[in-house]
Every structure is written in C-alpha cells, then in structure tokens.
Image (cartoon, grey):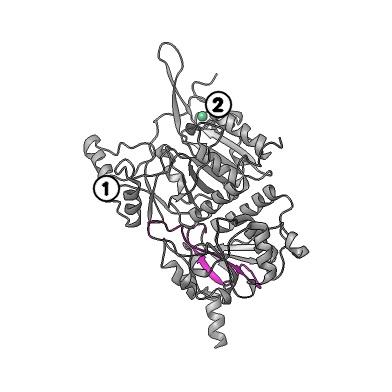
Amino acid sequence: MQANTLSGGFTDPATQSAHAFRSVMEAMARPGAIQDIHGAAPPAPLSPAMGAVLLTLCDTQTPVYLAGDMDCQAVRAWLAFHTGAPLVGPAHCMFAVGKWDALAPLAVYPIGTSEYPDRSATLIVECSELAASGATLTGPGIKETATLSLPELDAFQANRTLFPLGLDFIFTCGERLAALPRSTEVTRSSSEAITQVGAS
Amino acid sequence: MTEYNFAYLDEQTKRMIRRAILKGLAIPGYQVPFASREMPMPYGWGTGGVQVSAAVLTPKDMFKVIDQGADDTTNAVSIRTFFQRTAGVATTTATSDATVIQTRHRIPEEPLHEGQILVYQVPIPEPLRFLEPRESETRKMHSLEEYGLMHVKLYEDISRHGHIATSYAYPVKVEGRYVMDPSPIPKFDNPKLGDMAAIQLFGAGREQRIYALPPYTQVVSLDFEDHPFEASKADHPCGMCGATDSYLDELIIDDAGGRMFVCSDTDYCEARQTAGHKGKDAA
Ligand SMILES: [Zn+2]
C-alpha cells in the first residue's frame, strides 16, 4: 500500500466533514453558486474538492462508479481506504466520479423511480474550470437567475424534462464546487448566443 | 465531552442523513425516506428535527431553538443545551444572529436571510395520511399527482363551516408538483414558506422522512377560486409590544378569566419592547 493511500483524508473527520457538507448543501440548495470546500488531499486526478465530497458522502453503503482516468489504482486504493465504498458500473452507482466526457452517456445512470425519485445517481464532475459565467440557470434555489460554466447544455435540458426523476450534478474544480440538481432549468445566456453567432 | 460523537450521531448516520438532505433539496417537497436513529429524548421532542440539526451543524454555528415561537420552554432549552454540549455550538435567542434555527410549529416573524437554515420538527410528514392510511397508497398518489382527494377534503370544510377550517399544517403545493405538509405551523405562517432566502429542512423522526425547500422556492397554499387562501390570525394587536403583524397566543392572565393576546414569537416581541414599542397590557 502506497503512502499517499493512507494520507489525504480528513485529519479531524467529524468537524471537517460537517464543514464540507455545509458547502455541498449550500451548493445543492443554490444551483450555480460556487462554494469553497477544504480538508482533503487525494491522489491525482482527484481534485481536493472531489476528494472532500467523496469523504463527506461516501461509505460502504454507497456504490461508486469511477469513469475514465479516475478508474486508476491510486484512486481505487484511496477511496477504498478512506470510505470503503464498493466500486460498481454506471447502472448501479449512487455516485459517479469523472470528467464530463468520460461520464457519458448519461442514459445508463439510475434516475430513480416514480415512487422513489431519490433513488437516483449523483454525478460528481471534475472540471478544468468553474466560473459564474456561461449557461443561465433558473428554478428552485435561485432568486432570479444564476450563471454557471457548464460542459454542455443539451444533457441538462434533457435531464430537467425527467423531473421529478433525474440525475443531480456536483461540479468540482480545485478547492471549489457548484451543483446542478434536476430541478434547474438551463438555457443559453443571451450574451453567449451572440458570441456564438459572431463566431460562426 | 469526549464521550460523545460530534453532534451525538456517529459519522455513518450523519452521512446517511446528509445524503437524504441533498436528495430532498434536489426534489423540493418530496419526502425522502431515511433510517431514523434513537435519540436521547422522547419522540414528541422532535427527534427528526434533532437528527437533521445534528447532520448540518458545525462548531462555528450560532444555534437557536424555538418551541411554538418561544426560546425558553423545556423542549427548546434541552435541545439547545444538547447541541451546545455535543457539537460545541454557540447559542442565541436572536433570530437574526442565528445560522441554524430548529423550530417546532412556528416560522420566526423576522424575515430570514441567506446563509440561515430553518429546521422543522415534523410529527406527521404525509399530508395525505388522514385520507389514506397506507404508505404504499400515498406514495402512489404522490407519484401520479393524485391530489384530488385533498381538494375534496378542503372543500368539505367549506361546505360544513363556510370556510376552510384547517388552521394548522395547512397543505401546500411545491413548485407545482408535490403536495407537502408544512408541519403544524399556523396557516398564518404559510406565506413565509415560499421565496424564503433561507434553506428549509423538515425532519420526521418516528415516520423516518426528510424533506426540504431550497431558497426561493415556489410554495402555494391549496385553495379554491371562490375560497382563496387566507393567512388569518387573532384580530388584535399584541398586548405587550403592540405589534399588529405578528401571530398571537391568547393567554389567561387572572382568575377572573381576563385574557390577553401576545406575540407567540418571544424574540420578536422582546426586541420590539426593547425598541420602545408598548402594547396596552404592558406594565
Ligand atoms: Zn408582541
């Protein structure tokens, strides 16, 4: 077992996970609002934010799918040591971890059932940038509108049509995160549309 | 106090509750099942709310507990002391200073702000329960948006009493989808549920359900075109602070049956009195 498998967890799990959860909860309650999250130092390619989310939410009760390059020995060993979460394929996961392209196609993840819409996957997306610009968000948790850099629009618009079923998303980048629950409407912001027209 | 887990519950239990809270926020008004734990207090003391508070509190929080608006009942004091001891939180009675407020049966009069969390103690989370005792059936009704019976029940009220007699736990519809029980708050408080800046979390211990309203969520009290919803209260000013906009409790003040109306929100009333407002019964 490598040294960095044992390290990088919370040094004071009870209070650090309490603080980390508040960041995740604020993010999920206020779609598009970017939150700071600290305390984890996981092996690459996991960001500190991704590590903290996994330490806060995952354990032996939460099947996890590692997509693309997240499915490597270093991440497997770290996740197993710190959370004990069983690794599964996308169709049976409660949490999926990966970069956006590696997580596709979204149709394979559980979206809940009409009587238990909560039995759906949460996708934790590792992003190279996370900014309050790009797509326009409206819906519960948002006073008027919010903006968030999303990897694309179509997938989130299609997900919204499934409500109250659907997937929920957490975006991690460095030591920051934002979230997009299934309830959020996503539209192309007008400034972005103009830029696109200008470019074409 | 090292014999306690932080906030009493073990880490695995808090993770389970935290996951339920996130799904509740993602599906506003939908009741998420969770595996409720025994708490060192009786069920009537809001063990659902206590478990939700345990899952969200950090040592940096400023914690307030109200029981029907009052900070000083046995119930409120013991929950406040419990988290002071087990989570190391600071406590307050001032609504505006609190970051987490656990409540039984009231929403504070003072509008809440962003960064605050309101945790409700819920005895019966299922708004359809009195129409249909079977959980399998109510779950199906929610999934099919079969809420006609609920309207029939409210309309029976109108034909019997001339108005909707339900005055507590008045049902609401969230974002045009789920019908939700707001816990036994007076219907006077219902208009505060929608578009609130704070996060609202609901915990039912015995019934093992958690549900949530994110900030700025659309919440509509069920009503009829010819009988619109009314957020009624006793038609008096507060005897102590003179407020005309607050929810009032009726108190018997002497052996001769003398009565007085006073704000149920004690922090609101005291702050107004401190600011110099005086009602007709104030000394
Ligand atoms: Zn008063």
Q: x, y (%) of residue A29?
A: 54, 56
- Callout 1: chain: B
Magenta-highlighted residues: A114-143
Ligand 1 contact, mark 1 (Cβ < 8 Å): no
Q: Which residue is mark 1?
A: B149
Q: Is residue A187 above or below residue B97?
A: below
Crowding near the residue tagged with mark 2, few <14, some 14–19, many ≥20 C-alpha atoms within 10 Å: few
How crowded is the residue under tag 1: few (<14 C-alpha within 10 Å), some, or many (20+)? few
Q: Magenta segment: does it hold A131?
A: yes
Disc 1 residue type (three-letter)? Leu
- In the image, B99 versus B122, the foreground residue is B122
Pick the quarter of the image with the C terminus of chain B. Answer: top right
The residue that appears at 52% across and 79% down in the rendered structure is A193
Q: Outermost residue toward the top?
A: B255
Check the residue under mark 2 and report the chain it is in. B
Q: Earlier in the sequence, mark 1 or mark 2?
A: 2
Residue shown at 30% from the left, 44% from the top: B132
Quick one: SS at disc 1?
helix
Picture quadrant of residue B28:
bottom left
Q: Please name the residue that numbered disc 2 is placed on.
A: B74
List the single residue furthest toward the left: B159
Residue A176: tell me if it is visible: no
Q: Is residue A188 visible?
A: yes
The Cα atoms of the two marked residues, 1 and 2, are separated by 38 Å
Residue A9 position in % (x across, y down): 71, 57
> Residue B169, position in %: x, y?
39, 39
